[in-house]
Image (tube, rainbow, N blue to C red):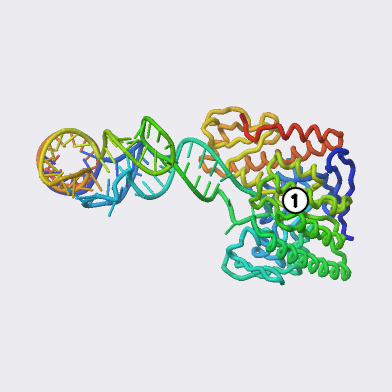
Amino acid sequence: MPSLKFEIVAECPHTRARAGLLHTAHGTIETPVFMPVGTQATVKGLTQRDLAGDLGVKILLANTYHLYVRPGPELIRGLGGLHRFMSWPNAILTDSGGYQVFSLRGIRKISQHGVVFQSRLDGALHTFTPQSTVDAQLAFGSDILMVLDECPEYPVSHEYARESMHRTLAWARAAFAHYRLLEQQSPVAGALFPIVQGSMFADLRRQCAEDLVALDASGYAVGGLSVGEPRPLSLEMVESTETILPRSRPRYAMGVGMPAELPEYVARGIDMMDCVLPTRNARNGCLFTSAGRVIIKQARYRDDSRPVDENCRCYTCNEYSRAYLRHLFLSGEILYAALATRHNIQRYLDIMREIRQAIMSGEFPEYLKTVRSASPDVD
RNA sequence: GGACGGGUGGCCGAGCGGUUAAUGGCAACAGGCUGUAAACCUGUCGCUCCUUGGAGCUACGGAGGUUCGAAUCCUCCCCCGUCCA
């Protein structure tokens, strides 16, 4: 077993929520955890010092597809691995590129062996296989590796979803076979997570989960969510496999979600989440606050001297007004992105801290109730 | 005083007889973004009325004129540039 250990420290007696500690070679992570997305080995707009220091981020996400295409896994390996390359002291989870099977569907081709992508950079073709994506992630030195999967678009037929799920399952087995082999040859630092798929069909997801459990992985992911389906469906899909995935292992809901959704996933037994919303929306003018969303470009903030969120302790909220941030946004100033991203990440991490605190103190159901009754936008 | 070149919707700027309420860009206003092809994308953007679809009104410096029809052609006038005196 790789150096990834999951320890449950508290459980909610009324929901499936739990609080835990995830021990990695690059530090211990309190769960439930939100992982900011740093696709190209950077969380756009922030320095690693901002993230690890001020914000207290313990684990980041990076992307195998993007880093494979540029600068390439061998270059990163040669420079001492991803941690050293990007000067990141804490843990890193790398996505396999499975999401790009979805998002780059116009320029890729799926076969039983893997996926062929045409690079957006130079048009060159790159083949991703279950084995090659494991190799790339090992070259990066990731703490958590993800298997190659197919993230199908929504909606798809049951027939296609079934075929796709079986392909993902086969890829997971191939990835694990390759990984176990390498593990026997020399110690492997990173843990490999398989991914439950099955589109929006609970029967397929259950079957997928059951088969994946046989791999005895250190953690399990639930993928294929938030691809355009109605919100309640995503939660239903997570519920469908909750009792199948071992409770002793961390569960990772990939690519979710909005602030109000985070506790919903936790209530359904999820321990790890990641999402581009706090970072991308920050850059696009949407700030998440304890009172709801602030769309900073709105005229109502033109001369608003208040901070983005009066209850936030981040540098942005401590120092700058909504009026100033709006000015920076409308002016296209780069500082805007940095300040906005910093705030949104702080907000997401605060939500996760609140959730964890509520679980630890036994008040998670009350916390959930409060979140559900709140408005999504600032009044 | 003379010779050219100009005056178009909040701004810049195209159009140079009908398909033009008038291309574009900017600004403004609003919406979207969920394992990042994203510091991105979409919509609205003269006024009034009605339900979509439309109906009416007012508009291309001003006033006349030519024409079935003018932002586009003609005349005069008013402004603004550049150059020559």
Is A145 displayed left or right of B73 in the figure? right
* Position of the C terminus of chain A by quadrant: top right
Residue B39's spot in the image, x, y percent?
55, 48
SS at circle 1: helix
Number of marks drawn: 1
* Position of the N terminus of chain A by quadrant: bottom right
Disc 1: which residue? A237
Task: Answer above or below: position of A171 versus B70.
Answer: below
Task: Answer above or below: position of A45 versus A167.
Answer: above
Residue A317's image quarter?
top right
Q: Residue at x 53, y 36 (%)?
A: A327
Q: What's under tag 1, amino acid-wise?
A: Met
Q: Residue at x 76, y 44 (%)?
A: A265
Which residue occupies the foreground of this view, A168 or A302? A168
Is A6 displayed left or right of A132 in the figure? right
Which residue occupies the foreground of this view, A75 or A156? A156
Can residue A246 be seen by looking at this rendering? yes
Residue B46's spot in the image, x, y percent?
36, 35
Residue A49's spot in the image, x, y percent?
72, 46
